[in-house]
Amino acid sequence: MTTPIPVVAFLGPSDSGKTTLMEKVIAALAGDGIRVAAVKHHSHAGFEIDRPGKDSWRFARAGSRQVVIAAPDRFATYRQLERELTLGEIAADITGVDIILVEGYRQAEVPHIEVMRAAQHREFVGNPAWRIAVVSDLPLDVDVPRLDLDDVRGVVDLIRQRCLRGGAPPPG
């Protein structure tokens, strides 16, 4: 029986530090031997994943609905969509990792960590029912753990305790 891969989202307003924190958390988890997948939600249609003029870009421009780029050490695919995929649909397609970390997807019903900086907006953006921690430079009174923006190890430990079986990656 296959168990779903745990998903943890990082939420917060633009320029709150989500990407920087998530990058550091990924590095720390990977350093601990935990296999991580990362998903970045881009809320606007039309982003470019390929470089103009490259062969794969030309195939997509010519009308290919799906483009695959394969090399001995890397594989990438992208396709045209009729509708935006849900986070669940995306996560179901990810294999070979212990945890999926997501930046964005505010409406997804997955555990999330809210990132809030004093220099930015001071409002929560996620559903409090799914909030497992707040990472901030503000002295907030919240009903979940509140960690400092530079406490990467604290965030990693919280993720391991709350979201990974036994606090460690599964065997295998």
Image: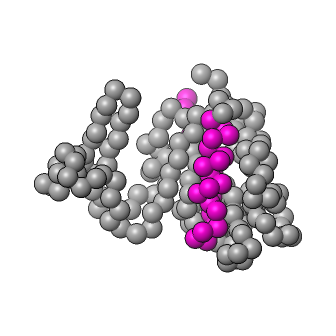
Residue 114: % across, % down: 69, 63
* Quadrant position of residue 146: bottom right
Q: Residue 166, can we see it?
A: yes
Q: Which residues are magenta?
A: 1-30
Q: Is residue 112 above or below residue 59?
A: below
- Asked which colour scheme the image uses, the reply is one colour
Residue shown at the point (85%, 69%) measured from the top left: 139
Q: Nearer the viewer, residue 109 or 117?
A: 117
Residue 33: % across, % down: 65, 29
Residue shown at the point (35%, 67%) measured from the top left: 45
* Quadrant position of residue 105: bottom right
Residue 101: % across, % down: 58, 48
Q: Is residue 117 above or below residue 163?
A: below
Residue 26 magenta-highlighted: yes
Q: Nearer the viewer, residue 101 or 120?
A: 120
Residue shown at the point (53%, 47%) measured from the top left: 38
Quick one: which residue is furthest to the left in this view? 62
Residue 95 magenta-highlighted: no
Total marks drawn?
0
Horizontal side of 142 relative to 128 (left or right) equals right
Q: Residue 130, can we see it?
A: no
* Quadrant position of residue 117: bottom right
Check the picture and name the quadrant holding the C terminus: top right
Check the picture and name the quadrant holding the N terminus: top right
Quick one: which residue is furthest to the top in this view? 172
Q: Is residue 62 above or below residue 15?
A: above
Residue shown at the point (64%, 62%) measured from the top left: 17
Residue 95: % across, % down: 48, 35
